[in-house]
Image: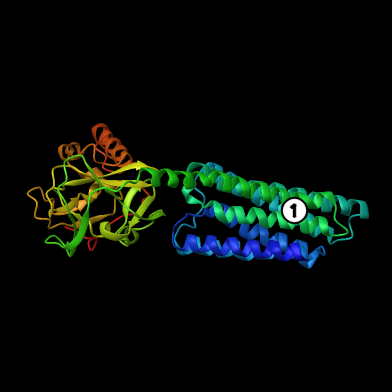
Amino acid sequence: MVFGILSGVLQVAGYLYYANKARKRELEPNSTSWIMWGYGTSLLLVIELDSGATAAMLILPTACALSSIAVGFICWQHNTLRWPKETWERTSLYTDLMLTAMYAGTWVLLGTSLLSDTQKEAADIAILVLVNLSTFVTFIPMLINTWREPRNENPWPWTVWTAAYLALGLTTVSSPEWKWYLLMYPVECMLLHAAVAWISRRHVLADAQRIEVQQPMKRVIAGPSRINGRGVFAGEDINAGERIRHVEGTIISHINTSKEESLSNPDWIGIGHNRWIDPAGTFKFLNHSCGPNVGAVTIAADTMVIIAMKDIEKGDELTLDYSTTECDPHWEMACTCGSVRCRKIVRSIFTLPIEQYEGYLPYVPKYFQAVYERENANKRIDGSVTPPLCEERKAGASTPRSSG
């Protein structure tokens, strides 16, 4: 019972931490895996209840079933709960549904008088094997997604859950009637959770690298702006090409699903594919100009630095062309920056005139350079104006966003 309670406490602690991070959009749960865990663990809990599992062994699956449903609800709130689009995600879901139907059918068959005692024992083992196959399949989307983008997950809750399944394994072997095959589920879950923790740890190492490259740079201050509200001003003379300061803030993963969403987070700055930084401190007030004097460049994982595009004198306002960090096709804002190059309506990067875009280089993040260059290649071929890489990007600005 002690190990059972410990496994439940660890499981709940991990979920509380994970749900808080997901609610703040500091990580992006893979909805396909969480959907499968929601219904799969719930069914497994019902089967274990019916098969007479001890109270100690039921604590963890109960916590897991309820918590998986809660994370799925968070995905629904954030509009990231979606039908799988990629082939490997759909294959995982269909395979898991088939395996779930098979072990549910076997469980129903056990409740009939059609099987002998020997057949019932074989059916019990078959259910456990199918459950473990199903568990492995449900982890495939999570493992692939985390490998592609480690920052979508956080290693700490997965490490806690690994410890929870270790405690469940100890609970199992502590039972006087335990059998070897009962260890398959906790051991498999312990290894799979440890794998996600190991893969996602890469972004923690990248953060350590980011801290190493963040050195004290130029002095900047916030103050009243003639462009819009408050702005960011140089606290000293800055030469063209000098790094001014890193943009600090919360890293957010998000997929835009509507025009309304594309205008709903005015301070976010795009740093990559479905990746944003919600700036903290002074750079929350960085205003737009169609004739900017600074650019934004990513220099490491999720690390953005503001660089002077021209000489800036002490007291000058720092301005960025918002289009250089935005590629959502829905996003636009009215502009009254006062620059001789003012475009009046500012839209995503692929709308920039070629000569203006080339004048900004190299002070444009690599991801957005790829977006622009691919879009212009499409234009030369067929006149298309559809952005090729950002169909589901979350916009990083709206009219109220420190706009010019």
Position of residue 333 relative to residue 148, above or below, is below
Disc 1 secondary structure class: helix
Left or right, 161 with respect to 336, comes to: right
Left or right, 8 with respect to 277, comes to: right
- Residue 307 locus on image (x, y percent): 23, 44
Which residue corresponds to the image point at 50% horizontal and 64% vertical from the top-left?
20
The answer to whether residue 377 of the structure is visible from this angle is yes
Q: What residue type is labelled 1?
A: Tyr
Q: In which quarter of the image is the C terminus?
A: bottom left
- Residue 357 locus on image (x, y percent): 19, 39
Residue that badge 1 annotates:
103
- Residue 161 locus on image (x, y percent): 63, 56
**Other-residue count near label 1 (Cα within 10 Å), few / some / many at <14 / 14–19 / ≥20:** many
- Residue 21 locus on image (x, y percent): 48, 60
Left or right, 396 with respect to 59, comes to: left
Closer to us: 395 or 165: 165
Q: In which quarter of the image is residue 301?
A: top left
Q: In which quarter of the image is residue 383?
A: top left
Which residue corresponds to the image point at 29% horizontal and 46% vertical from the top-left?
305
